[in-house]
Amino acid sequence: MTLEQYTVVQLLTNRYQDRGVKAEAIGTILDVYGDEAYEVEFSRGDGTTIAWFAVQQNEVQPYTESDVLKAS
């Protein structure tokens, strides 16, 4: 399943800890690279950017409001 630009996603891997982003981090897709990867910006709750980089399609999943309710 290819996601669209500006979709809010959750990271599924700790592969990017060295960039300050851990599994379960929330980001926004900035660009879609075919059906293989996405450029994603990860931000803090206040909106400041932590990092942005390309991730593989299988490293993120769509993030929904119901996910926020589960985390509460």
Image (cartoon, rainbow, N blue to C red):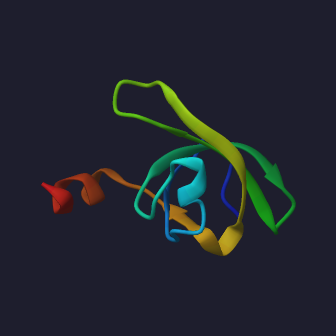
* Point 53% across, 59% down: residue: 17
Residue 47 coordinates in the image, percent (x, y): 43, 25
Would residue 70 be visible to someone looking at this image? yes
Asked if residue 58 lies left or right of residue 46, the reply is: right
Looking at the image, which is closer to me, 9 or 23? 23
Q: Residue at x 49, y 70 (%)?
A: 12
Corner quadrant of residue 46:
top left
Towards the viewer: 44 or 35: 44
Viewer-proximal residue among 70 and 59: 59
Q: What quarter of the picture does the N terminus occupy?
A: bottom right
Q: Please provide percent x and percent y for residue 24.
A: 40, 61
Q: Residue at x 50, y 52 (%)?
A: 21
The number of numbered discs placed on residues in the rendered structure image is: 0
Pick out the residue farthest to the left.
Answer: 72
**Left or right: 62 with respect to 46?**
right
Task: Name which quarter of the figure residue 60 lies in.
Answer: bottom right
Question: For the view shown, which residue lies furthest in the front direction?
Answer: 18
- 49 in relation to 24, above or below: above
Q: Is residue 72 above or below residue 6?
A: below
List x then y, in percent, for residue 10.
47, 58
Q: Quadrant of the C terminus?
A: bottom left
Where residue 59 sits in the image (x, y, percent)? 61, 70
At horizontal 34% and vertical 32% (from top left) the residue drawn is 45
